[in-house]
Image (cartoon, rainbow, N blue to C red):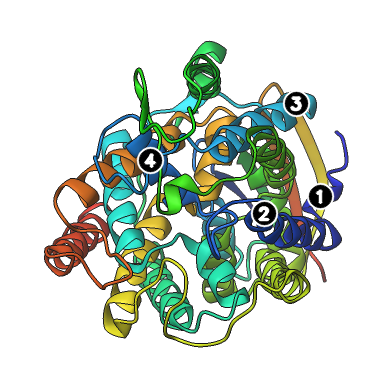
Amino acid sequence: MTKTIDARGLSCPQPVLMFLEAVKSPEDTQFEVLVDTEASRENVSRAAESRNCRVTDIQETGDEYHLTIVRKT
Amino acid sequence: MIKNVLATRTGIIVVGAVIGILAPLLQKLGNPGNMGICVACFERDISGAFGFHRAAVVQYLRPEIIGFVLGSLAAALAFKDFRPRTGSAPFVRFVLGVFAMIGALVFLGCPWRTLLRLAGGDLNAVLGLAGLIFGIWLGTLFLKNGYNLGRTQKTHAAAGLLMPVVMAGFLMLMLIFPQIEGVPKNDILFYSIKGPGAMHAPLLISIGAGLLIGFLAQRSRFCTMGAFRDFVLFRQTHLLTGVITLLVVAGIANLVFGQFTVGFENQPVAHTQHLWNFAGMALAGLAFALAGGCPGRQLFMAGEGDGDAAIFVFGMIVGAGFAHNFGLASSPAGVGPHGIAAVIIGFAVCLAIGFTMRKK
């Protein structure tokens, strides 16, 4: 299952906390995370790596980043 | 997308080391003892330079602070990281800034100076550091329970540029009304003729160091509050590595410069009331955690267009006015006459903010 997390406009640590909360439920294997600062993109990516996940794609549109994160199997 | 080298582990170590060398060097070149850089103290001095408080020994328009904001702006523009934004509970951030400053001035230092005091052998800073970590830990409890000041909104580029423009204006004032040797005031700006406010590195060196640190810190997201918060919240040691590097490198630099003296007594711009060193910094730590950044980080965020961070900075500058006008700030003699009351009120306000501003 894919879960979407909209963390736009939120400053750290909120985006990371939202991702870590979402990653707890084992049925979700893919996460689409929306953030709008580079710091949040870096922090969420770092948190993903630390939770056995991989950032497979980052789309940059205007001032926003769309991260695709997949749980490693 | 440009790879951000400074956001790597090596990058954060380099930034910690640069600050760890520059701060003791600035002290060597004239800044006050164990205060090569102190964001809280320097904003307090700026408040004094404008006459928002009249503590004659702490009045100087510190160019480092201006450099931090402008250096951060330069980095944000150079790497397409300038994000004008505002609107996440600005007045709450202002109030947090006021009490962050009051707490910091009861201890006598921001988190950066806590590290620099420790690196200079001031053991009172152990209490300050413990308080800081305790305050941040309290903050993480609120974060875990849904504390959230809400989303920011994108805003006009000009709105994001306003804080850097204000800082550039402050620099202009300093050039138009420069310090006159032995004179406490040049037209509108106050200048200390004795005390810590009279101690400063040459203007060009101060602004240069500020610009360099601002540039590097914006790229690396260096934050002393974030360092402890991220470790407590998710055992993440990224920022903490930078903070530890700062401490170790500054300690070595102080030994090299002969600025290292171990002990509790007679430390520069410090007092020995352990409980209030702890409690003051605990209040500051809680306020930083609720506002999402240490005072340095707030300046860097303000430089990259975050209007809410700019509000926090001005909360701290106004807080310094309250702290000195109301006798809340400590001195080497100990806590001020109303310092203890202010810490208690500060805790009541910050805890109320943490409890009531939650989203389920």
Q: Quadrant of residue B70?
A: top right
Q: Quadrant of residue B135?
A: bottom left
What's the residue type where badge 2 is placed? Asn
Residue B360 seen in the current view: no
Disc 4: host chain? B
Which residue in the protein does label 2 denote? A43
Q: CA distance from mark 1 to mark 2?
A: 13 Å
Residue B260 image-quadrant placement: bottom right
Distance between the Cα atoms at labels 1 and 4?
Answer: 34 Å
Q: Secondary structure at mark 4?
A: loop
Do marks 1 and 2 both belong to one polypeptide chain?
Answer: no
Q: Disc 3 or 1, which lies upstream in sequence?
A: 1
- Whether the residues at callouts 1 and 4 have beta carbons within 8 Å, the answer is no
Q: How many marks?
A: 4
Residue at mark 1: B6
Query: Which chain letter matches label 1?
Result: B
Q: Which one is in front in this view, the residue at disc 2 or the one at disc 4?
A: 4
